[in-house]
Image: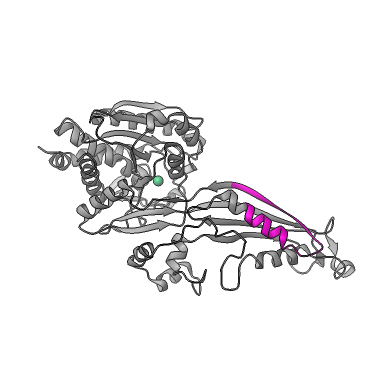
Amino acid sequence: MDWQGYLDREQPRFVAELLDFVRIPSVSAKPENIGDVRRAADWVAARLTAAGAEHAEVLPTAGHPVVCADWLHAGADRPTILIYGHFDVQPAEPFDLWSSPPFEPQVRDGRVWGRGASDDKGGMLIPILAVEAMLRTAGRLPVNVRFFFEGQEEIGSPDLPPFVSANTDRLKADMIFSADGLQWAPDQPQIVEGLKGLVSLEIRVQGPRSDQHSGLHGGGIANPAMALAQVLAGLKAADGRITVAGFYDDVLPLSEADRAAIARVPYDEAAYLAETGAPAAVGEPGYSTRERLWARPTLEVNGLTSGWQGAGTKTVLPAEARAKITCRLVAAQTPERVFDAIRAHVLAHLPPGVTAEVVQNPGRADPFLLPAGHNATAAAAEVLAQVYGRAPYRTRLGGSIPVMTTLLEHLGVHAVMFGFSHDDENLHAPDEFFRLDAFRLGQTAYGRLLERLGA
Ligand SMILES: [Zn+2]
């Protein structure tokens, strides 16, 4: 029997194992579930060993543990790949919105329903099963494989950077594939090429020592709320372009090929507006809405605070006004350079009669972009085209995934997302589910990927 036949034969057991895995309430955000996250780590290590992986170990970090394992007998002339995923899950509250209890998974309509079924327990089980099928039938893998699974992705992987930097020997690989990822649709694969970075800051404009009477002092001294409004209005031109000097300096321009790839992905502006309830799509001129969403940096005011916001009237001239701002960044911007540019712009454009400070808030992320011609991306795209019968879309995400930049920074390798979930599977919401068709297809895709990389 070949590995595909093994996968077919063992599918009922694999589904039962996924249900066992989902039954462990490994909620990383809640202190009362610390023991359950550890239990999930033990489950993963045991499952890796049962699959034929070696050196499966639960290893400590400052927070939730990680699990590492490997199989390194393909030969020094074969590449070593690292497979990443996570065994922690989001909190399941509110429980009463679930059709069946989140940690008592059920199979209905060809889907497994339960917290973590899609994000990422089903996803991270897939490569383990493909490896088991190959080891049980051929006795070997076409490439050297390392596994690296974590238990704190859903809280932003805070303890991962020090672990990865201290364990580069254990994790070093020629290519990295993340089993935590989405396909565009059940019949349409995608390669996610880019993720945005983030910088967060606050502008505080100060005027008088304390709030003043607007009748006694209005006209005599500056109003910080008005000064802040003038500063904010000056951050963008009327057409939506960001006017901060140097803001776009490090942005890699979109090539014609990039723009063609984005244009190939179906987009329905009316549906987008219906989804958000906004009356129109606006933004930086010269770019389509989707180009702006996926591949251009942004600057957004997230909150404004000043003066009196209660009922009726208070004739106050406020002492202070504050704005919180975040920018989503694209390659090759850095949070620090963008922060410095905004700070310099604000201080240079401050109206008279006020002072200001600009401070960086916690929550930074570097942008991520797969390089053109990247070997692991090409292999993944080829395999997806084979198993789906359609070339993958090349897409990007407006959000950030911290672990992708952590792996790049410490291991020097761009990870390729090779996961089989879909964004309609209620990730992070009640009634999360995972499609069993995608569970099975993903196993074939991982097997083909290992074969392709070992050829
Ligand atoms: Zn995930």
The quarter of the rendered structure image containing the N terminus is top left
Image coordinates for residue 361, horizontal then vertical, percent: 62, 48
Residue at 32% across, 44% down: 123
Query: Does residue 20 lie above or below 110 as drawn?
Result: above
Image coordinates for residue 24, horizontal then vertical, percent: 37, 36
The quarter of the rendered structure image containing the C terminus is top left
Q: Is residue 343 magenta?
A: yes
Magenta extent = 340-362
Residue at 16% across, 30% down: 139
Residue closer to the observer: 75 or 270: 75
Q: Is residue 342 magenta?
A: yes
Image coordinates for residue 246, horizontal then vertical, percent: 59, 59
Left or right of residue 435: residue 330: right
Image coordinates for residue 425, horizontal then vertical, percent: 35, 54
Query: Does residue 148 lie above or below 285 as drawn?
Result: above
Does residue 280 appear anywhere in the picture? yes
Does residue 115 appear anywhere in the picture? no
